[in-house]
Amino acid sequence: MTDRYMKATESLSGRDTLSSSSNSSSNTSSMTHDVLRAISGLTALTSLDVSKCENVTDEGLSAVSGLTALTVLDIQYCDSVTAEGKQALRDALPRLQIRGPEL
């Protein structure tokens, strides 16, 4: 995702599901902390798929920790996410189901 996608989040305020997963590495590698911060304003979001987004890290996950409606997060193949980052998110969002490798 790029700045173009960040601007698009403004029109997504009522969405409950968002997926950035793609077979195109150019889309998945550009998911940044800034994009996740922009997504953090989508308070109705219940499901977020950032699988295969190699730039997603613990810092990016912390940006969405305030999405209290979020119940599903897919972080498969997000190799920069640590066990500590996942646990911090679980602590913030106890109902959250995290899909991805057990760390």
Image (cartoon, grey):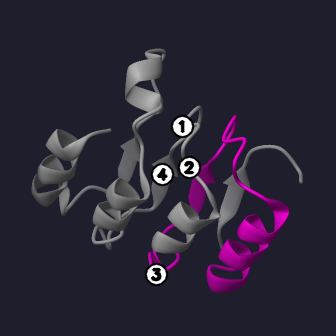
62 vs 92, left or right, is: left
Of pointers 3 and 2, the one earlier in the residue sequence: 2
Callouts 1 and 2 close, C-beta under 8 Å: yes
Callouts 4 and 1 close, C-beta under 8 Å: no
Residue 82 screen position, x and y as percent: 78, 59
Mark whose residue sits in front, 2 or 4: 2
Residue topped by disc 3 = 66
Of pointers 2 and 4, the one earlier in the residue sequence: 4
Residue topped by disc 4 = 48
Callouts 1 and 3 close, C-beta under 8 Å: no
Mark whose residue sits in front, 1 or 3: 1
Q: CA distance from mark 4 to mark 3?
A: 13 Å
Is residue 93 a member of the stretch shown in magenta? yes
Q: Residue at x 32, y 73 (%)?
A: 43
Residue topped by disc 1 = 53
Mark whose residue sits in front, 4 or 1: 1
**Label 4 neighbour load within 10 Å: few <14, some 14-19, many 20+:** many
Q: CA distance from mark 3 to mark 2?
A: 17 Å
**Label 2 neighbour load within 10 Å: few <14, some 14-19, many 20+:** many
Callouts 2 and 4 close, C-beta under 8 Å: no
Looking at the picture, which amino acid does disc 1 mark? Answer: Cys
Looking at the picture, which amino acid does disc 2 mark? Answer: Val
Q: Residue at x 64, y 46 (%)?
A: 75
Looking at the picture, which amino acid does disc 4 mark? Answer: Leu
Q: Which residues are magenta?
A: 65-94
Looking at the picture, which amino acid does disc 3 mark? Answer: Gly
Residue 31 screen position, x and y as percent: 42, 43
Q: CA distance from mark 1 to mark 2?
A: 6 Å
Relative height, residue 61 to residue 57 (above, below): below
43 vs 61, left or right, is: left
Q: Give the quadrant of residue 58.
A: bottom right
